[in-house]
Image: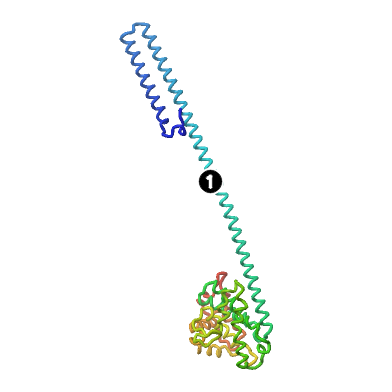
C-alpha cells in the first residue's frame, strides 16, 4: 500500500474502501448465486456441499478483507505514531527554546543591572572628580569657600521645583559646581584683593566664564554644562558678559539666580553679607531685566515654603519665619524619594 509520501495526491486513502466494496459485492454475489443453485438446480446432498463451499468462499473473502483492513490499520497506526512523535518533538523543541529564551533574558537582565551599577559608579566617580576640581578652586579663596556647593544645591533644587527633567537637574548641578572653574586662571592678587577691584582688574575677572568653558570643552561628559559655565553672568537686558546675550536658556537663568543670591548673602573682602530681606528685595527689583522674573519669584517661594529650601538658608542673616506649604514640598520630590519633612 502506498504512503502519503509515495502518493501525494492522497488516493491511498480510498483504496481500502474500494477493496471492501469489491469484497462485499463479490460475497453477496457468491451467496446469491449459490443460494439460487441450491434452491432451483441442486438436489439433495449436493446442495449442502455447495452451501458449505459458499460459506468457505465467504470466509476466505472475509479473511482477505480483514488482512487488507489490518494492513491499512497498521499503516494508519504508523502514521499516527509518526505524527505523535513529531508533535512531541515540536513540543520538546518549543520547551527547550523557551528555556533558552528565559536563560538569555536572565543573562540580559543581569547584564543590564550590572551596566546600571557601573554607570552609577561612574557618575559618582565623575561627580567626585568635579567636586575635587571645585575644592581646588575654593582653597584659593576663603571667601568663596562652599560657594559653588551652595549654588549647585539651590540650582538643582530650583530646577526640580520648576518641574525640569532629571537630566536637566543633573546637568545644572554639575554646571553650577563648575560655574566659577575659570577663576583658577585669575591671579591671587586680584582674586584675594580686600578692596574693590579697578576696572582693569574687573576686566580680568570677567574673563573667567570664557576661561572656564575652555577648561571643560574637551571633556565630553561636561559638554552640556558649557552653556551655563560661559553665560551665568549674562543678563536678559544684554548688559551681561562675556557675550552680551539677551536670549538665555532656562538652566542659565537658574544658575544666575542662585549665584547672585549666594554672592549677596555671603561675606566678601570689600563688604558685609546682605540680610535675606535686602537680597530678596534687590533681586526682585531687577527681575525681568537681569533675571527671569518668574524663576526669581519661584526661587524665593521655594526657599520660604519648603523644609529643604528653608534649611538651605540657615547661614543667611535675617531669614524670615518659615511658612511651609505641603503642595510645594511635593514639588521637591525626586525619583529616589521625597524631600525631608520639615520639623
Compared with residue 166, is residue 182 higher up or lower down, i.e. above or below? Answer: below
Residue at x-position 46% and y-position 23%? 67
Give residue 323's position: percent from left, percent from top: 53, 82
**Left or right: 247, with 316 as reference point:** left
Identify residue for label 1: 94
**Left or right: 55, with 301 as reference point:** left
Residue at x-position 50% and y-position 37%? 84
Instruction: Evaluate whether residue 217 shows in this view.
Output: yes
Give residue 81's position: percent from left, percent from top: 51, 34
Disc count in the image?
1
Compared with residue 174, is residue 242 higher up or lower down, i.e. above or below? Answer: below
Give residue 251's position: percent from left, percent from top: 53, 78
- Quadrant in which residue 31 is drawn: top left
In the image, 305 versus 166, the foreground residue is 166
What is the quadrant of the C terminus in the image? bottom right
- Quadrant in which residue 241 is drawn: bottom right
Give residue 80's position: percent from left, percent from top: 48, 34
Residue at x-position 63% and y-position 70%? 124
Compared with residue 272, is residue 72 higher up or lower down, i.e. above or below? Answer: above
Instruction: Evaluate whether residue 343 shows in this view.
Output: no
Compared with residue 60, is residue 163 higher up or lower down, i.e. above or below? Answer: below
Secondary structure, mark 1, is helix
The extreme left residue here reads 40
Amino acid at each position: 500500500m502506498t504512503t502519503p509520501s509515495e502518493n501525494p495526491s492522497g488516493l491511498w486513502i480510498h483504496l481500502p474502501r474500494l477493496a471492501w466494496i469489491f469484497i462485499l459485492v463479490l460475497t453477496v454475489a457468491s451467496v446469491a448465486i449459490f443460494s439460487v443453485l441450491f434452491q432451483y438446480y441442486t438436489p439433495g446432498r449436493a446442495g449442502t456441499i455447495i452451501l458449505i463451499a459458499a460459506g468457505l468462499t465467504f470466509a476466505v473473502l472475509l479473511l482477505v478483507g480483514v488482512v487488507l483492513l489490518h494492513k491499512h490499520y497498521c499503516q494508519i497506526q504508523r502514521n499516527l505514531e509518526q505524527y505523535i512523535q513529531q508533535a512531541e518533538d515540536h513540543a520538546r523543541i518549543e520547551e527547550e527554546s523557551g528555556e533558552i529564551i528565559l536563560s538569555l533574558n536572565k543573562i540580559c537582565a543581569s547584564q543590564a543591572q550590572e551596566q546600571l551599577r557601573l554607570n552609577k559608579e561612574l557618575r559618582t566617580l565623575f561627580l567626585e572628580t568635579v567636586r575635587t576640581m571645585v575644592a581646588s578652586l575654593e582653597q584659593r579663596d576663603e571667601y568663596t569657600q562652599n560657594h559653588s556647593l551652595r549654588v549647585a544645591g539651590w540650582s538643582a533644587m530650583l530646577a526640580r521645583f520648576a518641574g525640569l527633567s532629571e537630566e536637566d537637574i543633573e546637568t545644572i548641578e554639575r554646571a553650577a559646581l563648575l560655574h566659577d572653574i575659570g577663576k583658577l586662571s585669575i591671579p591671587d592678587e586680584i582674586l584675594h584683593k580686600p578692596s574693590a577691584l579697578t576696572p582693569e582688574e574687573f576686566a580680568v575677572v570677567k574673563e573667567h566664564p570664557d576661561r572656564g568653558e575652555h577648561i571643560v570643552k574637551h571633556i565630553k561628559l561636561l559638554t552640556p554644562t558649557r552653556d551655563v559655565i560661559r553665560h551665568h553672568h549674562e543678563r536678559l537686558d544684554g548688559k551681561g558678559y562675556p557675550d552680551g546675550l539677551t536670549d538665555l536658556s532656562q538652566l542659565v537663568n537658574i544658575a544666575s539666580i542662585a549665584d547672585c543670591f549666594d554672592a549677596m548673602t555671603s561675606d566678601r573682602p570689600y563688604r558685609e553679607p546682605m540680610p535675606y530681606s535686602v537680597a530678596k528685595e534687590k533681586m526682585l527689583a531687577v527681575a525681568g531685566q537681569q533675571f527671569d522674573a518668574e524663576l526669581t519669584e519661584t526661587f524665593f517661594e521655594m526657599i520660604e515654603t519648603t523644609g529643604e529650601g528653608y534649611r538651605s538658608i540657615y547661614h543667611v542673616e535675617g531669614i524670615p519665619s518659615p511658612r511651609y506649604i505641603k503642595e510645594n514640598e511635593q514639588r521637591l520630590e525626586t525619583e529616589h524619594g521625597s524631600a525631608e519633612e520639615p520639623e
